[in-house]
Image (cartoon, grey):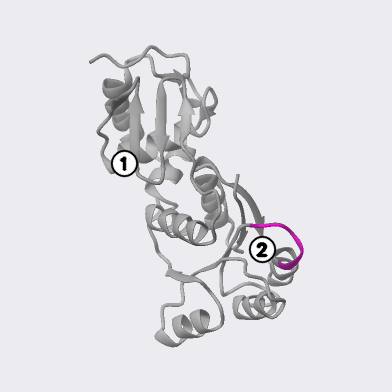
Amino acid sequence: MNRILIAEDEPRLSSFLEKGLRAAGFATTVVREGGAASLMARDEDFDLLILDIGLPGKDGFTVLSEVRNASQRLPILILTARDELEDKVGGLEGGADDYLTKPFRFEELLARVRARLRDEGGEASPVIRAGSIALDPRTRRVVVGGEDLELSAREYSMLQALISHPNQVMSREQLLSAVWGYDFDPASNVIDVYIGYLRKKLGADAIETVRGAGYRLRVDAPEAED
């Protein structure tokens, strides 16, 4: 499992990133201060660093310089609200592998993370299996009982979140965060709608409602009907 270090001082965003990346099958560690980010990136065994520029203590550009001066080839994705051209050029010329500005869509961040890990020869995104379901994040192919299943982008993202935690309850907030991003509306009923879509395609018993807690993908659920 790939390990990702998240250097982000805004609690809501760091929580969103942590939940979304864990739902996608990654192990995550969050730090909220530049000095700690620099030390951990240099001294511990991470596969990728997501780096905010506006960190307290040492800013992201300083962290980037220290990591690169230590000859670390750790892939670094800068994630920041700074969208000025000079900041982008400075980050990329300073050794960052990618630069993504806020606000952003989680699907794009996830695609960039996977691309960086593939470039480094990491074992990014192996096929995830649960019962009769197999999901390949690299090709976005879903197979159920040996048959390809067509899903919309949102249906796919929700299934990926659920299949990464088989037989575990995922709250509505976790699913909203993983699929719709950190700027989601917690009062929306969109989760219920998409759970309904997935049940029609996977089988009515594939996803269990846990009252007051959320939803759980049952790996022992019957296969979807033809």
> Pointer 1: residues within 10 angstroms few (<14), some, or many (20+)?
few
Which of the 4 quarters of the picture holds residue 148? top left
- Identify the mark nearer the N-term, 2 or 1: 2
Mark whose residue sits in front, 2 or 1: 1
Q: Which mark, by number, is residue 154? A: 1
Q: Nearer the viewer, residue 29 or 190?
A: 29
Q: Can residue 185 be seen here?
A: no
Q: Which mark, by number, is residue 23? A: none
Question: Seen in the image, is 91 located left or right of residue 43?
Answer: left
Residue at 52% in and 48% down: 21
Kind of residue indicated by mark 1: Arg
Residue, disc 2 = 32
Q: Which residues are magenta?
A: 42-46
Residue at 66% in and 57% down: 46
Kind of residue indicated by mark 2: Arg
Question: Seen in the image, is 161 located left or right of residue 95?
Answer: left
Magenta span contains residue 35: no
Counting from the top left corner in percent of width and height, residue 51 is at 57, 67
Counting from the top left corner in percent of width and height, residue 126 is at 49, 41
Magenta span contains residue 44: yes
Q: Can residue 166 be seen here?
A: yes
